[in-house]
């Protein structure tokens, strides 16, 4: 053993010894062998009694002082403190004995309902409408960007500054939005997925008593974000072409609506694409009443029958549209990269607000995505996935048509894009979801998206069948279980 090793060993032995002595003294105090205010024997006495070095005793006593068991008084050596830490905890446990469970008063109780105990992807057949096929993500390609970034870290980017997002990623997103979605002249903030964007916008624009116009069928996490600011949701009618502008006009006339929340490209959950004429009418109404529009464009690229209609944010002369989008469908939900696109004032306010929540988004992930976009891998992946989901949509449509021909009362419109079909099963689907979960099938049903509660649920017949995350074989097997469950 070399000298250095010996010294380290001796040190650790000594350390162990003083801690053992501190524990023994603490035990003696707890058991009342030494009482509050009583002076401890001198270090020399203890050292002789315990046959240890005086310094070891001094270290043990210092430890007890640090833990609050012993104090030092001028010229009177060390004494046990008057109020022992143990007395406080005993007092607390006496109280809790009378009231066994202490209950916090949470302000946002109902949000816990949004956290699934078991995520959709844990099921063998995952018909969740919002899930890409994570198995097809090019991890091998993507890891190179992470690896490069770790080999050559940009130290000046790794701190707490610049929480609007990594400049490289903002540049890439901005170029992409201009080229592919015709959005220009707005500023971008990167956030941890759309949900964070929705939440922050709610916090900045809404307060108790405000109203948010939403469709009857919609995206509950967005509703929850609005409600968390005290806002009330106003249901706007929708038909088979989407939100009904006439009804929106009537509700706006009643006052206090501060926001309109829309998913115009693929209405969530019904998948309908809002046509240009309705978009125009809604925009004019928003302008007339000075109301902001949140445009949640969550799966823009996955449009199959034509080029996707440009977002409302692409034609927004008055700056009314707050555009929110995400990489969750283009990559995977856990990537947690989304962005808010709006005017300078809102982006500045959001950036300041974000500091309250979590300072900034993951820098390495942002930089890796920026490099992936810059090198062209991102768009190749999009093209691959759009082709794949297009095929899967057609496959599911044909499968359902086969079932129709076999006489099942299924009806649906083939959506122009998206990752799911909204299907009327022709019979009540109440209880279907729970039964399917026991058969390893995850499926969302009408009940989960309907803002109007208290209706006769036996009338519910719609399911949202996601087709993106499964192969054709899996879709076939999973659908067979659903059909068997409903029609026997
Ligand atoms: C309507 C809607 N908005 C946004 C998102 C994406 O949310 P995030 O970016 O927080 O993952 C989803 C995903 O399911 C969605 O369906």
Image (tube, rainbow, N blue to C red):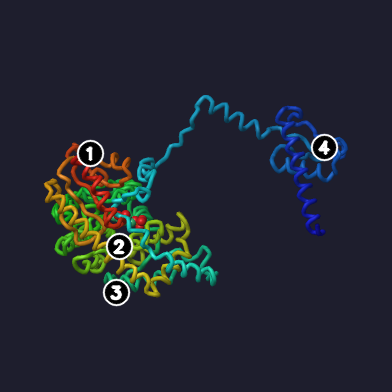
The residue under the point 33% across, 46% down is 230
**Quarter-of-image position of residue 349:** bottom left
Whether the residue under disc 1 has CB within 8 Å of ligand 1: no
Secondary structure of residue under mark 2: strand
Residue matched to label 3: 179
Q: Is residue 410 left or right of residue 76?
A: left
State if disc 4 and disc 3 touch (CB < 8 Å).
Answer: no
Q: Which mark is residue 430?
A: 1
Q: Residues within 10 Å of mark 2 (few under 14, many from 20)?
A: many
Give the percent coordinates (x, y) of residue 385.
30, 65
Given this view, does label 1 or label 2 mark the residue nearer the observer? 1
Residue matched to label 2: 323
Measured Cα–Cα span from mark 1 to mark 4 = 77 Å
Measured Cα–Cα span from mark 1 to mark 2 = 35 Å
Q: Earlier in the sequence, mark 1 or mark 3?
A: 3
State if disc 4 and disc 1 touch (CB < 8 Å).
Answer: no
Residue matched to label 4: 76
Image quadrant of ligand 1 equals bottom left
Give the percent coordinates (x, y) of residue 483.
21, 45
């Amino acid at each position: 053993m070399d000298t250095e090793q010996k010294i380290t060993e001796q040190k650790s032995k000594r350390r162990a010894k003083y801690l053992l002595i501190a524990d023994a003294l603490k035990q003696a105090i707890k058991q009342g062998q030494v009482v509050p205010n009583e002076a401890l024997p001198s270090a020399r006495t203890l050292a002789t009694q315990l046959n240890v070095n005086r310094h070891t005793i001094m270290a043990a006593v210092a430890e007890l002082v640090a833990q609050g068991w012993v104090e030092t008084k001028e010229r009177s050596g060390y004494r046990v403190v008057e109020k022992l830490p143990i007395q406080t905890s005993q007092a607390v446990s006496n109280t809790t004995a009378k009231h066994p469970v202490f209950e916090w008063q949470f302000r946002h109780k109902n949000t816990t309902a949004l956290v699934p105990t078991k995520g959709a992807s844990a099921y063998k057949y995952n018909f969740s409408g919002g899930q890409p096929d994570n198995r097809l993500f090019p991890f091998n390609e993507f890891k190179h960007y992470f690896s490069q970034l770790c080999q050559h870290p940009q130290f000046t980017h790794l701190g707490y500054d610049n929480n609007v997002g990594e400049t490289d990623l903002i540049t890439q997103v901005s170029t992409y939005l201009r080229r592919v979605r015709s959005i220009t002249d707005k500023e971008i903030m990167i956030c941890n997925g759309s949900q964070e964007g929705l939440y922050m916008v709610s916090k900045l624009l809404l307060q108790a008593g405000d109203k948010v116009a939403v469709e009857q069928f919609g995206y509950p996490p967005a509703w929850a974000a609005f409600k968390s600011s005290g806002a009330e949701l106003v249901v706007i009618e929708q038909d088979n072409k989407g939100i009904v502008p006439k009804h929106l006009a009537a509700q706006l006339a009643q006052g206090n609506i501060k926001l309109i929340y829309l998913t115009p490209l693929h209405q969530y959950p019904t998948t309908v694409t809002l046509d240009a004429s309705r978009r125009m009418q809604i925009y004019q109404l928003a302008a007339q009443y000075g109301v902001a529009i949140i445009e949640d464009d969550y799966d823009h690229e996955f449009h199959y029958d034509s080029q996707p209609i440009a977002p409302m944010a692409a034609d927004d002369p008055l700056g009314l549209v707050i555009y929110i989008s995400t990489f969750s469908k283009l990559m995977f939900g856990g990537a947690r990269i989304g962005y808010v696109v709006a005017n300078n004032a809102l982006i500045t306010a959001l950036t300041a607000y974000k500091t309250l929540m979590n300072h900034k988004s993951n820098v390495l992930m942002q930089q890796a995505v920026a490099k992936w976009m810059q090198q062209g891998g991102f768009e190749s992946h999009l093209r691959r996935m759009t082709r794949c989901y297009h095929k899967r949509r057609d496959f599911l449509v044909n499968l359902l048509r086969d079932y129709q021909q076999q006489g099942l009362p299924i009806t649906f419109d083939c959506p122009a894009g998206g990752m799911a079909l909204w299907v009327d099963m022709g019979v009540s689907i109440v209880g279907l979801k729970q039964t399917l979960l026991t058969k390893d099938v995850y499926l969302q049903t009408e009940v989960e998206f309907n803002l109007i509660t208290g209706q006769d649920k036996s009338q519910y017949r719609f399911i949202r069948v996601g087709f993106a995350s499964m192969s054709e074989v899996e879709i076939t097997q999973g659908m067979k279980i659903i059909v068997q469950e409903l029609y026997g």
